[in-house]
Amino acid sequence: MNAAAFTTLSLRPELLASIATLAYDSMTPVQAQALLHLLSGKDLIAQAKTGSGKTAAFAIGLLNKLDAQLYSTQALVLCPTRELAEQVAAEIRRLASAIPNIKLLTLCGGKPMGPQLASLRRDPHIVVGTPGRILKHLEKETLHLNAVETLVLDEADRMLDMGFLEDITKIIDKTPASRQTLLFSATYPDGIKGISGSVQRDPVEIRVEDSHHSPDIEQVFFRVEKSERIQMLFNVLAHYQPESTLIFCNTKQQCHDLSGELRELDLHALALHGDLEQFERDQVLAQFSGKSSSILIATDVAARGLDVKELAAVINFELSRDPEVHIHRIGRTARAGSKGLAVSLFTASDKRHLQAIEEYQGSPAKIVSTTTLTAPANFKLYPPMVTLFVNGGRKEKVRAGDLLGALTASGEITGAQIGKITLFDKMAYVAVEQQVAKLAVTILADGKIKGRKFRVRRLR
């Protein structure tokens, strides 16, 4: 059956115009199932994984009924992490591009309050943020939610995992009982049913069932001794040589320790976990998404909301205790029609977790002997890019085009040698090919961007 077009829905013309410019040819399964209910004003609880198109689903729903002439906060989207909040905000902005005068504000922790307070002098139409910072603004009475018509809890399962239930409850108490409440979750634990029962009215439930195994993912399991786990991980990387790898650990400490172990083995590995300061998280993500680090080690909570395209491999350093989480982990590879690789290491004590995965996916695990792993002599896995830090960002009116222009003006570096550019309020990150990294630092440090000099350094 062909997927339905957005033009089959009763959407405002400006929204259809934005959808057309974004080349959304047809609705994804979660959009097709959710949007009719969203547009009719129903409460909704939807289970769908990251990358399913759920953000566009609720964004279209809330934008379709938004009144830009009414200067009040009409929609609130709560997310577990700043990274996810910024991705959600960017998606809503893209979809709102043809609707004049929409004001959207992102309110997250890890950023100074001052600029947020200034932006709140006039109520934004849409607020996207994390529970802790939203609650702080409510306590200061700088954020007003008495006119909210749409409340979205995005990645609700992770917000519960991270202990946000009390904050979420306090925030919801500040919104009108007449609101539409939309709850999106990748998994469906009992806590989700509980929160739905307390904040939703007769919700429609939809589940976009993933196939529990993908034909585009080569999934293999290696049984290892606990003392050999790091060496076998090295052997896996050396055997498959993936360009980009996301390695899952079950604890923050394990992420930290493993990144150090791999760096001692001359592999460029970065760790992402809850103990990092916000600027450190931003830096790690800029390096990995810009292909200047080949390996990212993360916990499940820290990895939620990551938007990394063309992820060559996912490796489970340890099996998840939850088979649904395991499927969610490995589903991050083989996106957008590409082939993917999922490798899991397990020990004899993990037998129960392995059986749970087999039962959940409805097929036996492909267990391969570690003797099949062949590591070339003197193996090194060098990332193709280097990320440069620039101490100027949006506040200094620096745009991606300014950085691109400064780097290519002399003709010594071509646009093809420049990768992802990531802008923040007070800093920017620019990925460049390894062979021109030194030259790029010199050009940016010695020259001017927007008529100003900025400090530039290479990230290691």
Image: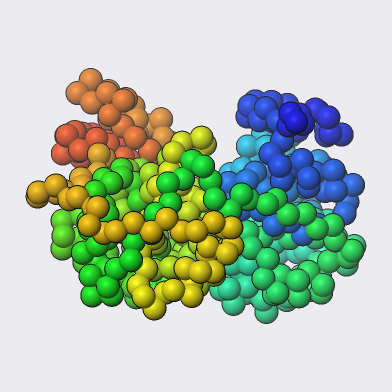
Q: How many marks?
A: 0
| 366 sits left or right of 158 in the view | left
| 364 sits left or right of 404 in the view | right
User: Residue 448 versus residue 368: which sits nearer the camera?
Assistant: 368
User: Residue 272 versus residue 254: which sits nearer the camera?
Assistant: 254
Q: Where is residue 149 in the image (x, y as percent from the top left)?
A: 83, 56
| 214 sits left or right of 311 in the view | right
Q: Is residue 85 visible?
A: no
For the view shown, which residue lies furthest in the left direction? 378
Residue visible at 89% across and 63% down? Answer: 202
Chosen colour scheme: rainbow
Q: Position of residue 102 (x, y in %)?
A: 71, 42
User: Residue 312 versus residue 83: which sits nearer the camera?
Assistant: 312
Residue visible at 35% across and 51% down? Answer: 245
Residue visible at 26% across and 59% down? Answer: 370
Q: Position of residue 305 (x, y in %)?
A: 53, 55
For the view shown, which residue lies furthest in the top direction? 411
Q: Position of residue 387 (x, y in %)?
A: 28, 45
Q: Can residue 303 be seen in this view?
A: yes
- The relative height of residue 127 versus residue 251 in the rendered view (above or below) is above
Residue visible at 61% across and 43% down? Answer: 91
Q: In which quarter of the image is the N terminus?
A: top right
User: Residue 213 versus residue 306: which sits nearer the camera?
Assistant: 213
- The relative height of residue 124 versus residue 145 in the rendered view (above or below) is above
